[in-house]
Image (cartoon, helix red, strand yellow):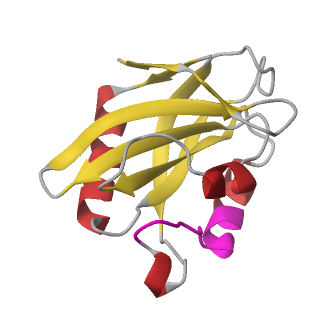
Amino acid sequence: MTLFIPNAVMKAIQDHVRETYPEEGCGLLIGDISSGFGDPESDVRVLDARPLKNMANPQRKNDRYEMDPQAWAAVEKEFSGQPRGIVGIYHSHPDAPAWPSPFDLQRAWPAYAYLIVAMTAAGAGDLRVWRRSEDGRSFIEGRTEVL
């Protein structure tokens, strides 16, 4: 899988997770769901990103994220019946690498791309994209192409 993402959208994501540091920032990736979406080998084309509030327990916001379910539902409703919709999730790892944690795996849904941005006080660092394996026991790393 390759995640194709416009430079302006990537910059908006990096700005969002910079603002939330030292807590995890999170949001939804919006893209084309018309053909091939859900196929483990299919590429993902991001068109936009929607930052959402991290609703995790305040003591765990530096290593957990939980998106506002009402905001998520509003985004799903907005794109209902359209060829665009939620194709993935992004979140940051403050002062940690852009590798999925066991918590990330527990929460992962099939078909979605998971973009993780490493963040430090100096700013956004490494970023990597992942997709949950079909058996749900691991992640498979993809490639990211910023357009």
Q: Position of residue 136 (x, y in %)?
A: 82, 39
Furthest residue to the right? 135
Q: Is 73 colored magenta in this rendering? A: yes
Q: Position of residue 124 (x, y in %)?
A: 24, 45
Q: Which residues are magenta?
A: 62-74
Is residue 82 found left or right of 6 in the rendered image?
A: right
The residue nearer to you, when weighing 85 against 24, is 24
The residue that appears at 69% across and 38% down in the rendered structure is 112
The residue that appears at 50% across and 39% down in the rendered structure is 115
Query: In the rendered image of this protein, does residue 142 appear above or below residue 70?
Result: above
Furthest residue to the bottom? 58
Is residue 17 found left or right of 122 in the rendered image?
A: right
Q: Quadrant of residue 36?
A: top right
Q: Position of residue 111 (x, y in %)?
A: 76, 34
Q: Position of residue 106 (x, y in %)?
A: 73, 55
Is residue 141 found left or right of 61 in the rendered image?
A: right
Image quarter hosting the C terminus = top left
Image quarter hosting the N terminus = top right
Q: Is 84 colored magenta in this rendering? A: no
The residue that appears at 30% across and 28% down in the rendered structure is 7
Furthest residue to the left? 122
Query: In the rendered image of this protein, does residue 140 appear above or below residue 145?
Result: below
Query: In the rendered image of this protein, does residue 125 appear above or below residue 102?
Result: above
Q: How many marks?
A: 0
Query: In the rendered image of this protein, does residue 116 appear above or below residue 62?
Result: above
The residue nearer to you, when weighing 102 against 8, is 102
Q: Quadrant of residue 110?
A: top right
Is residue 134 found left or right of 75 in the rendered image?
A: right
